[in-house]
Amino acid sequence: MDIASFRALLGPSGQALLSEAAGLDVSEDGLLATASRLRGRHDPALVAAALTQVRLRERARAKFGDDAVRMYFTQAGLEQSTRGSVASHRARRFADRLPGARVLELGCGIGADLIARARAGLAGDGVELDPLTAEVARANLASLGLDGLASVRVGDATKEDPCGFGAVFADPGRRTARGRVFDPRSYEPPLDVVLEKGGQVPAACVKVAPGIPHEAVPDGAEAEWVSVGGDVKEAALWLGELAGDVGRRATLLSSDTDPDVWTLTPQGLDDPDVRAWGRYLYEPDGAVIRAHLVGEVAELVGGGLADPHIAYVTSDELRPTPFASAYEIEDVLQFSVKRLRAELRRRGVGVLTVKKRGSAVDVDRLRRDLGFGGRRPSRSTSRGTAAELTLVLTRVGRDPVALLTQPVR
């Protein structure tokens, strides 16, 4: 899709075509026939643009909910955009700490963060290097009725002067034609460049990859890792007036729609105790692990670690916490495929979930070796119902261990 086709899509005939295409079969099986039918009455380039938007909007529902049907996307823009719930969470901090501030966004993409901050009442200017993506961001602001609060222009983030703005938000590119970029020095623009821009204004926030090394977090910044529904989605560095004094935090959003929000920060604890397996296993949320706050979870549940280098917490107490999933340990076995296969058969296990941490075992191969590869066996217990089990593979020191557990609902 080029700019000319996209602009045509925003016109009356393009909008009519887009509405028509939304009601047709755009699945892999039906796409070719739908495209052929529409090309008989419309410009082929416009048809391609409309069908692309319909398909991208369907995919975008996972990130943007009901807004997706009113928004516009490029494939790369959708993949790299902030999901709506996370952008709204971040916008609340801007609004709470910098009411009335105008924010310069470097690398605004399709405008997800601009939209969230505008809805929180903050005006902003977005800068985007790619002309088509900038055009899409402008269309999104207009479609959602926010173009009076925020604007987008084509520009090079490295050449922007942030002086005069109340804050900077930066979302450097972390994906190239070769795939994801993990080294902050290889971001586009590099992390040190956007941090320098952020240092020129009273406050700043930089979106970074969840795997950012802790040593790459600058002094005085607050690093926040965010998960949604148990999956780590991203991290951000808060600077200046937007930074707290905690250094790092894990934030959990329960869902994308009207989420509950929980935050865990360092409590100045010593290293967690190392102890034998207790009655319960706690698996900390990924954001907690990324933020190096496993010790805080151990304190919350009255437990410790079976191995000091592996983020599994064990305790004899069941203490509900949003920061970890709990499993009741039924048995602890030295790892052996033969012994596991016999034990699963004895228990009549029909549904097996396998988790691992600190284990080099190939899970897919193990499932096959245990008789669960590529299918859900329908073995039955004496009561006639298939037993379920969660198998946790880990180690204590150099000894591989298999935990037979049940999730605590």
Image: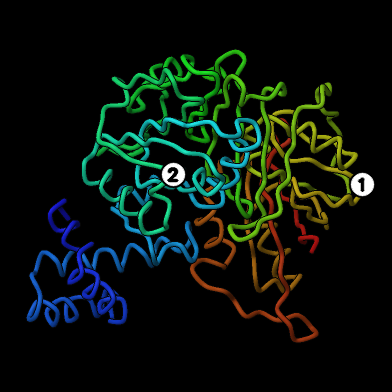
Number of the label disc, if any, that sits on residue 149: 2
Residue 23 at what x, y percent from top left? Answer: 31, 81
Is residue 295 rendered to the left or right of residue 1? right
Give whichever of 60, 69 is nearer the camera: 69
Q: Which residue is mark 1?
A: 316
Residue 267 at what x, y percent from top left? Answer: 81, 26
**If you read the primary sequence from the N terminus, does the residue marked by circle 1 or circle 2 appear first?**
2
Residue 179 at what x, y percent from top left? Answer: 32, 39
Disc 2: CA contacts within 10 A as few (<14), some (14-19) or many (>=20): some
Rendered-image quadrant of the N terminus: bottom left
Give whichever of 321, 205 is nearer the camera: 205
The nearer-to-camera label among 1 and 2 is 2
Q: Amino acid at mark 1?
A: Asp
Q: Eyeballing the image, is 384 above or below 365?
A: below
Point 36% across, 22% down: residue? 190
Q: Amino acid at mark 2?
A: Leu
Give whichever of 16, 58 is nearer the camera: 16
- What's the CA distance linking mark 1 and mark 2? 54 Å
Q: Eyeballing the image, is 306 above or below 375?
A: above
Q: Eyeballing the image, is 97 above or below 158?
A: below
Is residue 200 rendered to the left or right of residue 107? right
Give whichever of 31, 68 is nearer the camera: 68
Disc 1: CA contacts within 10 A as few (<14), some (14-19) or many (>=20): some
Quarter of the image for residue 367 reads: bottom right
